[in-house]
Image: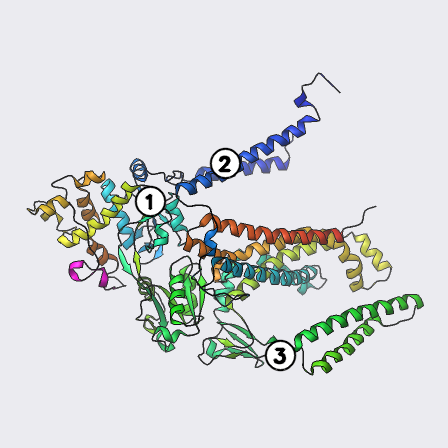
Amino acid sequence: MNNTAPFWRSRRFKPVLLQLLFVVIAGICLFYFINNALTGLKRLGLPLDFGFLQSTASFDISGDKLIDYSATDPYSRAILVGLFNTLRVAVLGIMFATILGVILGIARLSNNWLVRNTSKVFVEIFRNTPLLVQMIIWFSAVFLMLPLIENSYVFAGTVFFSNRGIAIPWFQTTSATWIWLVCVATAILLAITVWKWRLKLQTETGKRKYPSLWAVGVTAAAMIVPLLLTSAGPFHVTMPEVNPNGRSFAGGFVISPSFASVLIALVMYTSAFIAEIVRAGIMGVSKGQLEAAQALGLKSSTTLRLVVFPQAFRIIIPPLTSQYLNLTKNSSLAVAVGYPEIVHVGNTILNQSGRAIQMITIMIICYLTVSLLTSLFMNIFNKYTQLAER
Amino acid sequence: MKKSPFFLLFTFMMLSAAILIGCGEEDTASDETADGNVFDQVVSRGHVVAGVNSDLPGFGYLTSDGTYTGFDVDFAKAIAAAVFGDAEAVEYRPLSAQERLTAVQTGEVDVLLRNTTNTLSRDAIGLHFAPTTFYDGQGIMVRKDSGITSLEDLEGARIAVDTGTTTEMNLADTFRLLGIDYEPIVFDGQDQVVASYEQGSVDAWTTDRSGLVARLDTLANPDDHFILPEVISKEPLAPVVNSSDAIWYDIVKWVVYATIQAEEFGITSSNIDDFMDSENPEIRRFLGLEGELGEELGLDNDFVVNIIKQVGNYGEIYERHLGPDTIFNLERGVNSLWTDGGLLYSPPFR
């Protein structure tokens, strides 16, 4: 230990001291801003309480809602409707964007000139234009331009395209649905067991034992049970039709123009980014791995599935998580096309009640919760795919 | 020493940042807080900062040559004329329906003239409403060929509405009372509302009747549409100020009254000079020829003269932006003087 240097230059104290200094400065800044907001509110005579959430909302939310809601419900329930709408578009968006993004990413590496360049043009167009502009174009230039409801374009007699929404046939649960659900779940478990058993047999004997075929057979056979039990299908299919007043659809499932444009815009935009991430991931797998797989005589699809993807995953997942978070947060642009997600509903409440800071705090908490949960889930998945280091 | 490309890039970025920041206009009002002396700040700043609409023809509209014009804008000019004797001493801040109230609460604007409805809950959040400048009511526009002639016909209809306004709530209240099911389609901004309506994606759209009339003219075939006779709400549109400064509130209030009182006296911007030697003591006090009414407010005694000369009386302002010579051709209706059966009534200037 060198005793001539003062203690703040000591190797042991200096980092701690700097960190302490940083925390103190950050703390002071934070305190200043919070205190500033609180004194500001006090001066304006606005208490920072959340009691107003229990008062009657007195505004309606359009048809896009997952839980029951009417104008007589409190603000808190309206916020819940908005949150569920955000989750709905985020979950569906993440699913479709991943599928489309992976396809586009692989297509960009294709040996086929047309496939490769189509994908490239798609990616460059959707990646390089603002999302809000895309959303408004989808809404006003595509979905609003569909025919009026009375002369809807009908596809195969069941799917209606109109500028009041796209109506598709939809499932309706019946009393038999639950019995079917239980039976199907059991059948799938059974099929997995059988598949494992046949696979084991195949590895042991070296003869083909068709594990997949067996699994499918078992599932199909198990389906007979609920059919005999309930003597009905698992669900009812309702066909959409135009209401007598000619203003909306009855039956089926109606995808509103607002929801459709938000979802499509988010999927297209995000999938362009995901495509690049997937491409980077695949190209990040060293060439030696591919050559080794070829040398072993693996088919190109098998190479992709067993050699490239497991390694590409490790590169893809962290940036993919950011894209998922971006998609969720970008859904807040939906207010421009009239989809009632959390920011949309929150803004209405903010304006009606004048509680700006409270509503913005609630919105921040909602997004933070959703984002942190997404990150947590993706981090677990990431850990699972990482190389086990020795 | 050889400079690395990163060093060059960094230097370039820093320089551009410095230039871009330097470009920013010095912000005059937003760094001041509304702590009870709005009027002092206005005077020391030398102009009034007014929050206005920039896309509602007739009330607040940004013209192609970059100037603001409209009914609400003229009241901002009247306030500037009263305070500085110069109707052009106004800085306009275009505000959205959502931003506007916060802008007054935080002191970003001195006065809000953006067709804002006076309601109790808005009054209670640190705001004060000056006298109503325009008595409006919410209406609903439908297509003539839709067969809709009354509210009852709107069962199951899709109705487009602008977010951040009281219209959403009025719509819900009205249909709740009538027990009619409808579907509100809420947009941020009126352009998408009107676009959805024009394309037939919704059956009807709603806003204040003055707004409907103003927009009707911009539709492709104005004759294909009409406004339902039912008025579903009361919408007294009034200037808004921060409640912290009672003096400033009084000034805005009496500027509005001055325009109304001037019309009642029959004083216009063209004939005001004839009144300067009036014998009528009420008019002499009103124009600041006698007494010190202006100074009691902290203004010049002839503040009313400045308002009328530079902007005009209420009737003139109305005719200029909404009257028969304009595309809107709005009836005065309840916005007439009380002497003509309307609601405009100024307390006496004495």
Amino acid on which the number 3 mark rests in the picture: His
Q: How many marks?
A: 3
* Residue under disc 3 on the same chain as residue under disc 1: no
Q: Is residue B109 visible?
A: yes
Subunit under mark 2: A
**Nearest to N terminus: mark 2 or mark 3:** 2
Residue A128 visible here: no
- Secondary structure state at the residue bearing disc 3: strand
Q: Which mark is residue A32?
A: 2
Which residue in the protein does label 1 denote?
A: B243
Q: Which mark is residue A169?
A: none
* Quadrant location, the N terminus of chain B: top right
Q: Quadrant of residue B188?
A: bottom left
Which chain does the residue under circle 3 lie in? A
Asked whether A318 or B285 is in front, the reply is B285
Q: Residue at x 61, y 61 (%)?
A: A91
In screen coordinates, is B147 left or right of B326? right
For badge 2, the amino acid type reads Tyr
Quarter residue B229 falls in: bottom left
Q: CA distance from mark 2 to mark 3?
A: 60 Å
Q: Position of residue B57 (x, y in %)?
A: 32, 58
Please, which residue is most extreme toward the left here?
B279
Q: Position of residue B114 (x, y in %)?
A: 33, 53
Assign the magenta stretch its main secondary structure: loop
Residue under label 3, please give it: A236
